[in-house]
Image: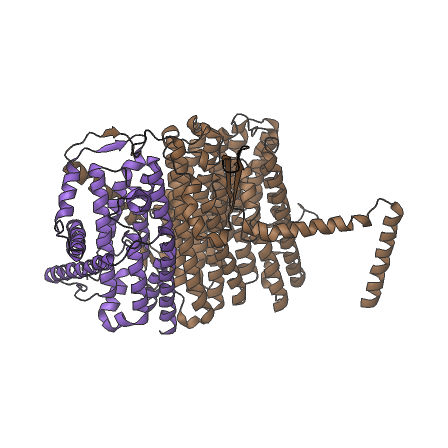
Amino acid sequence: MSLVGWLFAAALALCALAAIGGLVWPRSWVAGAGTVAAGLAAATAGVASVVGSRWSAWLPDVLPLAGVRLSIDPLAGLFMAVTGGVSVCVAVYGIGYARTPGHRLDSRGVQAAVPLFVGAMVLVPAAASVSTLLLAWELMALTSLLLVLAEHRRRAEVGRAGLWYAVMTHLGFAAILAGLALFAAGAAGESFDQLRAAELPPGLRNAVFVVTLAGFTSKAGIVPLHVWLPRAHPEAPSHVSALMSAAMVNMGCYGIVRVGLDLLGGGPAWWWLVVLAAGALSALYGILQAVVTSDLKRLLAYSTTENMGLVLVGVGAAGFFAASRAPALAGLALTAALLHVVNHAGFKTLLFLAAGSVLRATGARDLDALGGLRARMPHTTVLFAIGALCASALPPGNAFVSEWLLLQSLIRVSPLSGVAGAVTMPLAVAVIALSAGLAVATFVKAFGVGFLARPRGVGAERATESPPSMLAGMGLAAVACLALAVVPALALPAVGSAAAVAFPQTPPGLVSGAVTLALAGVRGVLSPLLIAGSLVVALVAVLGTVRLLAARRARRVARLWDCGAGPMSARMEYTATSFAEPLQRVFDDVLAPETDVDVTPARESAYLVERVAFHARVPDRVERRLYAPLLAAVDGVGRSVRGLANGSVHRYLAYGFYALIGMLVVLAVLR
Amino acid sequence: MITPVQVAVQITVQIVLVVAGAPLLTGMMRQVRARLEGRAGAGVLQPWRDLRKLARKEPITPQGTGWVFRLAPLVAAATVLVVAAVVPLTGTTSPLAGVGDLFAVVALLALGSVALALGGLDTGTAFGGMGASREMTVLALVEPTILMSIFALSVRVGSTNLGAIVTRTAEDPLDVVSPVSLFAAAALAIVTIAETGRIPMDNPATHLELTMIHEAMVLEYAGPDLALIEWASAARLGVLLGLLASLFAPWGIAGVGAGLAAVALAALILVIKVAVLGALLAAGEVFMAKLRLFRVPELLAGSFLMALLAVSASFFLG
C-alpha cells in the first residue's frame, strides 16, 4: 500500500474513531480532535495523490456481491484535499461552537455524525465503481441529513428544511442510480475501468449523461434543482452549513467531471452547452436572489448556487472546447473551474463560520437586525471582511484569480469554431460579468449592513466576541484564502494535474509562473502578488503623503450630519432591504417581488388611518412557479386516488390479483 | 528590450501626470462649463486650492465610525495610483505589464468604489447608505458592459493585455474606424461617465442629498479625508479618459524601447488628448440634465447592447 493509501485509510479510521469517541464521550473536543486529524490525513492524501502517487484497491469481501473498489487519482485527490482542508477548519471551529448554550450541539448524535459526514465525503471521490460511489453518496446524504436536523426541537422550520433536503437529495440519488445503472448495464461491468473502456451506442450515452447530470446538479445546487439549498443551509448548524456548502456541493461538480469527461470521455457539443447554460442560469439567478435577501445564511446559500454555476460554466466550456477540438482551451477552462472550486471552498467556509459566530453572539440571521458588530466582535468582523472580499471577486481576493482564468478561457474562443461558440461564449462572459458585479453589491451589503454602523437590534447590541477555538477555525480558513489569493501558484499545479485526468491530451504548462501567471501562447498575464504588493505600497505612499501634508494630526470626534434634527436613531439607518431596493426594482421582472400594504382606518372615519402595515418579500420564483404547481398536482393525485384505498382487505387482494394478471398478459404479449 | 530605468521613468511620468494633472483636469472641465453657461468660473487652479485648504483642516471622525471609515479614502486613492501605474498612458508597453491586464484594472477601480461604499455604510446615516446602495447598483450594472467591451477589443489581438491592444491599434490606424472600435468606444464612453459619476448618471455639483450618488456616500468626510476622496475621483476620471485615449486614439504614444524624449512627447500629447476629451465631456454636460436614477439602467442596457454588437462585429466582420 502506498503513502496515499495509508493516509486515506488513516483518514477513514480516524473518522470512525472520532464518531465512536463522540458517541461514548460527548465532549466537543473529542470528536473535534478526531475530525481535525482525519481532515489533515485526507488533505495530505489528496495532496500526495495530486503530486503523483496513485493508489487503488479492490476489497471484494467488504460488501456482498460487488465488493468495494477504491482508486485515488489527481482529480479525486483534489476534491479529497479540499474536503480535508474544509473539515480541519470546521472541526476546530466546532469545538467551541458546539458548546453554544441552548443549541444542544454537543449531543452524542451530532458529535458522532460530523466525523461520519466528513468520512463519507472523503470516500465519495475515492470510489472507483458504481456501487461504491452510490454507497458513499448515500452515506453522505444520510449523515448530512441528520446534521441538518440537529436543531429540529428548537425551530419548526428545521423539520421542513430537512424534508425538502431529504426529498431533493434522494431524487438526485435516484437519478444518479438510474443513470449509472444504465451505464453499467451497457458496459457489462461496474468498475470505472470497465466503464471507461465501454463502447456505448450514442443514444444510451446521451441518456446516461442527461440522467446523471440531473442527479449531480441537484447536489451542486444548480437551478432549477437548487431549492433545498436556501432552506437547508440556513437551518443547519453553521459549521454543518460550512461543510455542506464548501465541501459537499463540490461533489456534484466532481460527479459531472468524472462521469461526463472522464468515464464517458467527453461527448457532443450540446451536452456541454446544456451544462454551460445551466451554470450561467444558476450564476445569475443565485446571485440575484442573494442580493435581495436579508437573511445572512440564506444569502450565503444563494451565493453557493452562484459559485457552483460559475464552476459549471467552466466545466461546460471545457467540454465544449474539447468537442470542438481545442484541447488547450479545454484544459484552461477546466483548470479555471476546478480552481474556482478550491477558492469557493476557502471563502465559503470562512463566511459560513463567521455567520455562525454572528448567529451565536446575536441570535439573529436577519441583516436588518444586525449592525454595529465592528466594535463588539472586532476579530470576526475582520475575518468576515476577508471572506467577503474574496467572495466578491475583487483583487486581492482569491475568486478574482479563478474568475480571471475563466474569463481568459472564454474570450479566447476562436471565431472559426462555429456559430455556437461565437454566440455562447460572449453571453457567458456577460453572465459572469453581471454575476460578478451583483456579487460585489451582495457582499458590500452583507458586510456593510451586517457589521458596520450601529446595531439595529437588541441581539446585536449585546454581542460579544467568539471563543478562541472558533476564531482559530475561521483564522485557518482566512489564511488559506489569502494564500490562494496572493500565491495561486500554490494550488495551480494540483488543479492542473487534476484537469489532466479529464483531458489527458492537454499540453502541460497551460498556466505557469510562480509570481506572475502566464498563459501558454498568449500575452495575458496576471500577478496577484504584485497587485497586492503594489496596493500596499500605494496605501503606504498615500498615508505618508497625507501625514506629511496634513497640517493638523489630532482627529476630533464630531456629530453625524442629521439635517439639524437631533441625534439619529438606529432605525434611521439604511437596512439590507433598503440597500437592495434599487437592484430589486431594476430586476423587477425577474424577481417578481411581492408587496402588501394593509391600511386599517380608524373606527370614526374611513379617512383617518389608524395603522399601516407593509410587507415585502421576494419569494424564490422557481420554487413558486415550478415546485408549487408540481407539489399541488402530486397532492391532488394523492387525494383523488384516496377512494381506491378504502381499507378493505378484499379490495387490496383483488388489486394484487389484477396486477399479477396484467403483468402476465403484458409478458405474454411482449415475449 | 525595456530596461528597468525606462520602467521607472515611465511609471514616474504617469504617476506625476495623474497626481498633478487630475485636479487641473477637473478645474479645466468646470471652467469650460462655466464659460458655456456664461459665468466667469473660478479658474483652472481652483481644485488645487480646494485640496490645499482641505488638507490644512482638522481631521474629523464622525461619532460611531471606525477603521472602515478611516481606511476607505486611503484605499480609494491607492487603487487609482496602482491603476495609473499599470495602464499604458505614455508608452505601449505598460510599465507594470506583468501586474495585470484590463480585467485587473477594472477590478481595481471597482475595489476603490467598494471601499468608499463601505465608508458610507459605516456612518450609519441614511445618506451614506443611500449613496452606497446606488453606487453599488450602478457598479453591478456597468460590469457586463466593461467586460464585453474588453472582449471585443481583445478578439483582434487574442489577448486582454493592454499594451498589446494599444500596440495593435497604433500599428494599424484604420482599426479605429472599424465597427468593433466604434461600438466599443461608445460603450466604454458611457461606462466612463457612469464610473466617474458625471451627468447624466450623477451630478458631481449637486447639493440635494436625495439625488446624490457619489456625493451622498462621502457626505460625512471632511478635511484631509475629503481631500483624498476629491483627488481620487478626479484622478479616476483622468485615468479613465487617458485609457480611452490610449485605446481608441493611440497616436503619438511611445513605442517599445523609446527614448526619454519620446516619452516626454507622448506625455504632452496625452495631456492634450485628455484635455480635449474632458472639454468635450464638460461641453456635453451643459446640454444635458441628470437622468432619474431608475432611468440609468436603461442607458446602461443601451451601452451593453453596443458592447454586444462590438463583440458580434469582431467575430463576424473579422
Above or below, comparing residue A347 to residue A558 in the picture:
below
Quarter where residue A271 is shown = bottom right
- Which corner quadrant holds the C terminus of chain A? bottom right
Q: Which tint was used for chain B? A: purple
- Extreme left residue here? B261
- Extreme right residue here? A650
- Extreme front residue here? A605
For the question of whether residue A58 can be seen, the reply is no
Q: Is residue A456 left or right of residue A613?
A: left
For the question of whether residue A644 can be seen, the reply is yes
The foreground one among A526 and A555 is: A555
The foreground one among A83 and B151 is: B151
Horizontal and vertical percent position of residue A590: 49, 54
Horizontal and vertical percent position of residue B288: 27, 57
Above or below, comparing residue A510 to residue A6 in the picture:
below
Quarter where residue B194 is shown = bottom left
The foreground one among B168 and A80 is: B168
The foreground one among A637 and A49 is: A637
Horizontal and vertical percent position of residue A307: 46, 50
Horizontal and vertical percent position of residue A27: 55, 26
The residue at 60%/53% (across/down) is: A626
Task: Count the numbered circles shown.
Answer: 0
Q: Which chain is brown?
A: A
Quarter where residue A141 is shown = top right
Above or below, comparing residue B125 to residue A248 in the picture:
above
Q: Is residue B236 left or right of residue A27?
A: left
Tell me how the rendering is colored: by chain
